[in-house]
Amino acid sequence: MAINFDQGLSVHAQALILREKRSELLAANLANADTPGFKARDLDFQSVLTQTLSSNVALDKTQAGHLTPSAEMLGGTLKYRIPNQASLDGNTVELQVEQAKYAENNVQYQASLQFLKGQFSGLMTAVRGQ
Amino acid sequence: MSAFKIFDIAGSGMNAQSLRLNLVASNISNANSVSSSLEGTYKSRQPVFAAELQNVLDKANAASKVNVLGVVESQAPAIMEYSPNHPMADAKGYIFKPNVNTVEEMANMMSASRSYQNNVEVLDTAKQMMLQTLRMGQ
């Protein structure tokens, strides 16, 4: 029986990619905290993950050489944040909100990493057979 | 690896904020530079920030850096003061002081320094994330 790495690592590998993408977006929000008219954006993680996991977004494969799109190519759902207190210059970045989200995302990234580590050690045990 | 982009983004933010701090320093240090003509008076300088627009519209590559569009001089009028004994006074006995509001500049400085710190924290966290990823599977 061959070990399928995609199934062996389950959803955590994709979750890691999305977490990384989200941290990039939140970093951009924080960097633009003083840019007039900048609209803070975030990844709707729930919808992106279900979209990535469900099969209804799969592209038709009409030729033998066609590849399945990777999770990064799907783009994901970007949404604008609704500010609690809108500022006059049109900027919707709220520092404390973004900082909290960034910290939260970092912890979730580490959680995904831990899960992946567990999967890897499980696979290693299977490979060594000890 | 797209985490390298976080370094670029936070770096652009730090760059923008340090320019802002530079301008605050320039404004405050020139706050008392007296001149004898309206044109020759120092004017308060402020940076103009903008998000890089091509990235804002692009969904696949959404995170945008901070772009410094330029530095503008404040259009507020210089302060005219009647002081005929001043060595820089003009023919009518007036001297001109810059339109720098030092209180405003101090608040500006604190805001810039906090924003700079924020970007440093983001960069540090991203670095930790990357180092942890490198250790994955060990």
Image (cartoon, grey):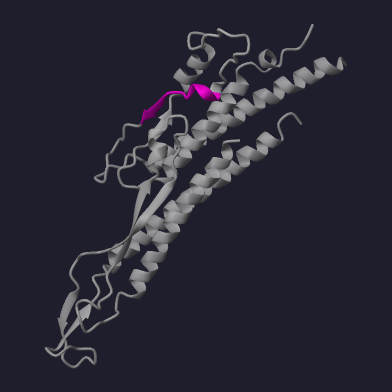
Q: Where on the picture, by quarter, is residue B88?
A: bottom left
Q: Please give the name of the residue rendered at 48% of the width and 49% of the height, measured from the top-left corner.
A: B119
Q: Is residue A83 left or right of residue A123?
A: left
Tell me if residue B50 can be seen.
yes
**Residue A103, position as x, y percentages in the image:** 51, 37
**Residue B19, position as x, y percentages in the image:** 42, 60
Q: Please give the name of the residue rendered at 42% of the width and 56% of the height, measured from the top-left corner.
A: B17
Q: Is residue A61 above or below residue B121?
A: above
Q: Is residue B100 left or right of residue B13?
A: left
Q: Please give the name of the residue rendered at 38% of the width and 61% of the height, measured from the top-left corner.
A: B109
Quadrant where the image shows the C terminus of chain B: top right
Q: Nearer the viewer, residue A27 or A86?
A: A27
> What is the residue that sits farthest to the right in this orientation?
A130
Tell me if residue A34 can be seen.
no
**Residue B101, position as x, y percentages in the image:** 26, 67
Q: Is residue A58 above or below residue B52?
A: above
Q: Is residue B82 left or right of residue B42?
A: left
Residue stretch in magenta: A72-80
